[in-house]
Image (cartoon, rainbow, N blue to C red):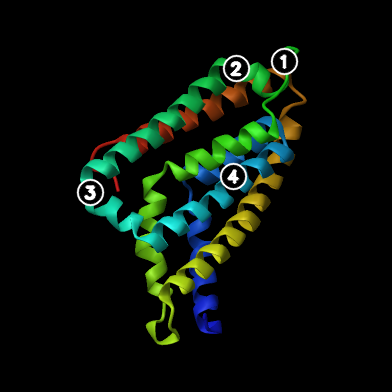
Amino acid sequence: MLSFSQIGLFTIASIALIFTPGPDIIYVMTRGMAQGRRAALAAAAGFGLGNFAHTLFAVLGLSALLMASATAFQIVKWAGALYLIYLGVQMIRHAASAMGTGGAAPMSGWAVFRQSILANILNPKVAIFFLAFFPQFVDPAQGRPQLQMALLGTLFVILVLICFGTVGLCAGWIGAWLRRNARAEVRMGKIAGSALILLGLSLAWPNRG
């Protein structure tokens, strides 16, 4: 099992990494600012729960296979990048409807959740992160290293839900203020979409992590 020192060190390191700017946390912020707290929390839940898949991959050794195969890494990397770009283009094309203006309904929380969990699973950097980061906190002397990694993965999911949820709530308050102005709504949708496109291009850029 895990010792208190393992849990403490892992929690501190994880929180620092979770709040590091990246596609996931930026997507939560943009959704919150575009549609409000409910959409932001749906995105946070998707990104958080998606880490269960990466935990399973790490435990089963699939992450090791992904890291060992440059071709597999690139395929998944480009798939994730294209998906982010697609989401960005959709947000720009439907900026008004994404914010609930122009008489169109905003994206449902379930749709945001599906997008978020899929974007997380398609991000190979998360898989590599789990493989590289988690073993640092696995103590062979405690026995059952696979169980330790599974428990660490569960703890990481909980931390992501808490941290991303907090970010989403704050972004929702900002978005509620911005939505008082119709032009600001459309502008925020375009900015959010552009940010996702840039993130997708950055993820797919050669010789980048």
Mark 1 lies on a secondary structure that is loop
Q: Is residue 162 left or right of residue 200?
A: right
Percent of width and height locating residue 167: 64, 49
Tag count: 4
Choose the circle earlier in sequence order: 3 or 2.
3
Indicate the amino acid at tag 3.
Ser
Mark 3 lies on a secondary structure that is loop
Indicate the amino acid at tag 4.
Gly
Does the residue at mark 2 contact the one at mark 1 (Cβ under 8 Å)?
Answer: yes
Mark 2 lies on a secondary structure that is loop
Please name the residue that numbered disc 3 is placed on.
Answer: 69
Choose the circle earlier in sequence order: 3 or 4.
4
Does the residue at mark 1 contact the one at mark 4 (Cβ under 8 Å)?
Answer: no
Indicate the amino acid at tag 1.
Ala
Q: How far apart are the alpha carbons under marks 2 and 1?
A: 9 Å
Choose the circle earlier in sequence order: 4 or 2.
4
Please name the residue that numbered disc 2 is placed on.
Answer: 94
Please name the residue that numbered disc 1 is placed on.
Answer: 104
Q: How far apart are the alpha carbons under marks 3 and 4?
A: 27 Å
Q: How far apart are the alpha carbons under marks 3 and 1?
A: 44 Å
Percent of width and height locating residue 114: 58, 36
Mark 4 lies on a secondary structure that is helix
Q: Quadrant of residue 123?
A: top left
Does the residue at mark 3 contact the one at mark 1 (Cβ under 8 Å)?
Answer: no
Please name the residue that numbered disc 4 is placed on.
Answer: 46
Percent of width and height locating residue 11: 54, 70
Q: Quadrant of residue 75?
A: top left
Choose the circle earlier in sequence order: 1 or 4.
4
Q: How would you rate the neighbour count of disc 3 (Cα within 10 Å): few for under 14, some for 14-19, many for 20 or more?
A: few
Query: At x 41% / y 81%, what residue is drawn?
Result: 139
